[in-house]
Amino acid sequence: MAKTPRIAVVGSANIDLTTFTDQFPKPGETIFGQKFDLGFGGKGANQAVAAKLCGAEVFMVARVGSDLFGPATIKNFEQLGIDATQVRQVEGVSSGVAPIFVDPSGQNRILVVKGANDELKPADVEAAASVLKAADCIVLQFEIPLETVYYTIHFARKNGIRCILNPAPGQPIDVKAVADLDYFVPNESEAETISGMPVRNLEDAKKCAASLLSSGMRRVIITLGANGSLLAGRDGMEHVPAFSVKSVDSTGAGDAFIGSFAVFLGEGLPEREAVRRANLYAGLSTTGVGTQKSFYDRARFDAEWTARSKS
Ligand code: RIB
C-alpha cells in the first residue's frame, strides 16, 4: 500500500467563467458564443483538487474575496475533503476570477483578475507554518504575489520540505530567486517568457531546460501539451511522451499534471514513472469540460492507467 502524501498548496483560487466559441468579437462588435460553464478554478485550487482526487491529504493556503464566490470556494474545498482552515476571506476585495475562452479545437485563452489572491502575503504563510511544516511537499504557482512565492520557497528549504513551483502565468522573474526548489515545472510559453528563449519544439525545450539548469535549478520539467513532457536534470534529459486522448478542453491540464505529479512522487514512485502517470492524468483532464470538474478520481485514473500502460 503506497504511503499517503501530505501536500500543501500555497496559491490561488478563482471562479472560472468559461465561454466556448468559434470566433472572437472585434472592438465594438457583439457576437454569440456556443456554450458557457461556471466552475471553481485557479491554478492553486486546481492543483490542490487534483492532488486530493489522486489520494493525498491536502492543505490549502489561499485568500478569497468578500463576495458570493468567497464562501462558495471555501465550501468547495471542504466538500472535497481539502483542509481549508488557512483559506480566509479578505474584506473589501473581490475573489479571483478568470474569464476563459475555449475554441473548437479545445485550446483556451485565459484572462485572470487576481482579486483576493493578491492579498496572500508572506505573513499569511508564516501564520500557516504549523500546517505547512506537517506537509511533505509544498506546491506553488504565480497567481499570488511573487514575494509570497519567494518566501515560501525559502520556508520549504529551511524546513526540508519538497517544493514544486509551477511558474504560471509566466512572467519575467529573477530565476536565481526561485532556484532553491526541487522542481521547476513550466509549460512551453511559461518557459519561453521566463528564459527569454523560444520554446516551439522538443529541441528548443531542451536548450531552454539546459539554460534553466545552468541558472541553478535542480530539476526542470517542461510540459509540452500533446507532446508529453521533458524531464531535465544535471544528470541528463528525457522526453516522456504523452498518451493519446480526445481533447475537448485543455484548460487546467497543467494543473492536473502538477497536482498528480506531486502525489505520484510523494507515494515514492521513481521520478520518470511519476511524470509518465502525470502525463496521462493531465491528458485525461482534457477529455472533459472545465478544470476541477474534468479531473479524474484515483479509481478512474488507475483503471485507465492499467489499460493504457500495458500498450
Ligand atoms: O490553469 C487553469 C486556471 O488558470 C483556471 O482555472 C483559471 O482560473 C486560471 O487560474
Image (spheres, helix red, strand yellow):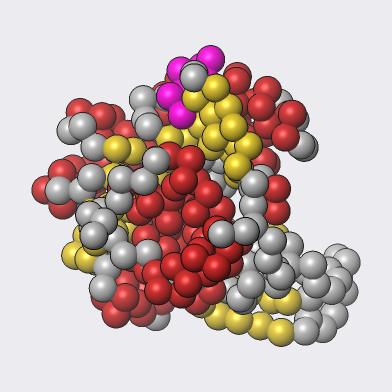
What is the magenta range? 212-219
For the residue pair 39 and 203, the one nearer the viewer reads as: 203
Q: Residue at x 27, y 41 (%)?
A: 122
- Whether 217 is among the magenta residues is yes
Observer able to see residue 42: no
Q: Quadrant of the C terminus?
A: bottom right
Residue 8: give x, y in percent of width and height. Answer: 28, 52
| Residue furthest left in the image | 130
Image check: 121 left or right of 278?
A: left
Residue 9: give x, y in percent of width and height. Answer: 33, 53
Q: Is residue 278 above or below residue 162?
A: below
Image check: 48 left or right of 311?
A: left
Image check: 34 left or right of 98?
A: right
For the residue pair 214 and 170, the one nearer the viewer reads as: 214
Q: Residue at x 23, y 60 (%)?
A: 1
Observer able to see residue 8: yes
For the residue pair 99 and 250, the one nearer the viewer reads as: 250
Q: Residue at x 84, y 79 (%)?
A: 30
Report the label total: 0
Residue 20: quarter of image = bottom right
Residue 73: give x, y in percent of width and height. Answer: 36, 74
For the residue pair 88 and 47, the one nearer the viewer reads as: 47
Q: Is residue 69 above or below residue 218?
A: below
| Residue furthest top in the image | 214
Residue 38: give x, y in percent of width and height. Answer: 55, 80
- Whether 173 is among the magenta residues is no
Residue 78: quarter of image = bottom left
Residue 62: quarter of image = bottom left
